[in-house]
Amino acid sequence: MLISFRSFIFVYLPLGDIVQMHAVAGGLGLFSPKLARLQMQSYVIFVIFFCNIISKNNVIEAAATVKLPKNVTVPAVIAFGDSIVDTGNNNENFKTFARCNFLPYGKDLKGGMPTGRYSNGKVPTDFIVEAFGIKELLPAYLDPTLQPNDLLTGVVIAAGGAGYDPLTAKLAAVASLSDQLKQFKEYIEKLKGIVGEEKTNFIIQNSLILVVAGSNDISNTYFLSGVRELEYDVPSYTDFMLKYASDFIKDLYGLGARRIGVLSAPPIGCVPSQRTVKGGIRRDCDEKQNQASQLFNSKLSVEMDHLNKNLPNSRVVYIDIYNSLLDLIINPAKYGFEVANKGCCGTGTIEVTKLCNQLQPAGVCIDDSKYVFWDSYHPTERAYKIIVKQILDNYTSHFI
């Protein structure tokens, strides 16, 4: 059983509050007054150990599969962007349609309860944080049940529906990347209040920072709504996206982040909803959207390489997930999938977020492990697991 030294420090610091809370609840009444000092020492040890065990995001349940050199540590994972990594930040945002804290979302998570993850189970950040042996699940920063020791090992600040283009988040009524940056600053201040400035700086500098955005810009803001299409052609719009992406990475660097992984846009024209809306009667992939993603990715890759070379002591890494997901879609049988053009939820052609619910008549598929997509926009847990393994195999060394 693994007990994190990081969690030990984190629980120990606010110990006075914990002891006082349990004392009021009668927890200390179990001990004899004659053994007060010994009991307090025992109780302190118990509280630290117990808090490590019961934390829902604790490292105890995470067995590391990524082997790092002895002099390298990744104390936390922090994620920004959209629904691919969001684990519940939109749950209390009743202005947005982009919520999924209801069944059948999350049905395959431990306990079978929805958490705000846009899938049937775990999402990429969960697999990544588990692979590094940090903890089993990466919690949402706005989760009201979040505990101090959860902050020490990372959070998800991403919001489903967001994008590099500020208009994308505005249309979806969710936190934009600039809003997420403000939350990151707040997160850093919370860390300083718990472990001090020196330890906080160490955590931020050595953490793996992930940025996942771009698909909503292309599919929703440009092609579906047509708002940006009135102002830009595809080449100029991808330049527009790129400027915001580059500025965001520079802002993260300015706040102390050094290991920054930036995921590419996916083959968005091949997700089930875009096939339905733009793929014609045969529901083919929409090549216009895929071409826009590819154009943006080519620019993003060059820009991230430029930042990596010009931001001192940085590891800014462009991560290609376009081809990983496309291979699952084109060659599903190669990975044990049977369905790649529809989602498991409902008819699989259009249902996403609120349309994917327990009341819709089509229900869910019998075996979601045979599907690449969970709903009409987001992959299944099994598809995510395959993609994340490829990411870790191909890119982990770039951050060391």
Image (spheres, rainbow, N blue to C red):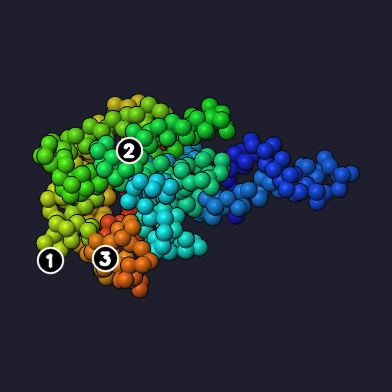
Residue for badge 1 = 282
- Locate the N terminus and report the quarter of the image it occupies: bottom right
Residue for badge 2 = 176
- Using the numbered discs, state the Cα–Cα distance from disc 3 to disc 1 in whole angstroms: 15 Å
Callout 3: SS: loop
Kind of residue indicated by mark 2: Ser
Residue at the extreme front: 95
- Using the numbered discs, state the Cα–Cα distance from disc 2 to disc 1 in whole angstroms: 35 Å
Q: Residue at x 89, y 44 (%)?
A: 34
Q: Earlier in the sequence, mark 3 or mark 1?
A: 1
Q: Residue at x 63, y 48 (%)?
A: 51
How would you rate the neighbour count of disc 2 (Cα within 10 Å): few for under 14, some for 14-19, many for 20 or more?
Answer: many
Query: x, y percentage for residue 353?
Result: 33, 56
Residue at the extreme right: 34
How would you rate the neighbour count of disc 1 (Cα within 10 Å): few for under 14, some for 14-19, many for 20 or more?
Answer: few
Query: x, y percentage for residue 281?
Result: 11, 65
Within the image, what quadrant is residue 171 found in?
top left
How would you rate the neighbour count of disc 3 (Cα within 10 Å): few for under 14, some for 14-19, many for 20 or more?
Answer: many
Tell me: 57 left or right of 8.
Answer: left
Kind of residue indicated by mark 3: Gly
Q: Are marks 3 and 1 in contact (CB under 8 Å)?
A: no
**Residue 294 in sight here:** no
Residue 12 is tagged as none
Q: Nearer the viewer, residue 167 or 96?
A: 96
Q: Residue at x 53, y 30 (%)?
A: 192
Query: x, y percentage for residue 20?
Result: 72, 40
- Using the numbered discs, state the Cα–Cα distance from disc 2 to disc 3 in whole angstroms: 28 Å
Residue for badge 3 = 348
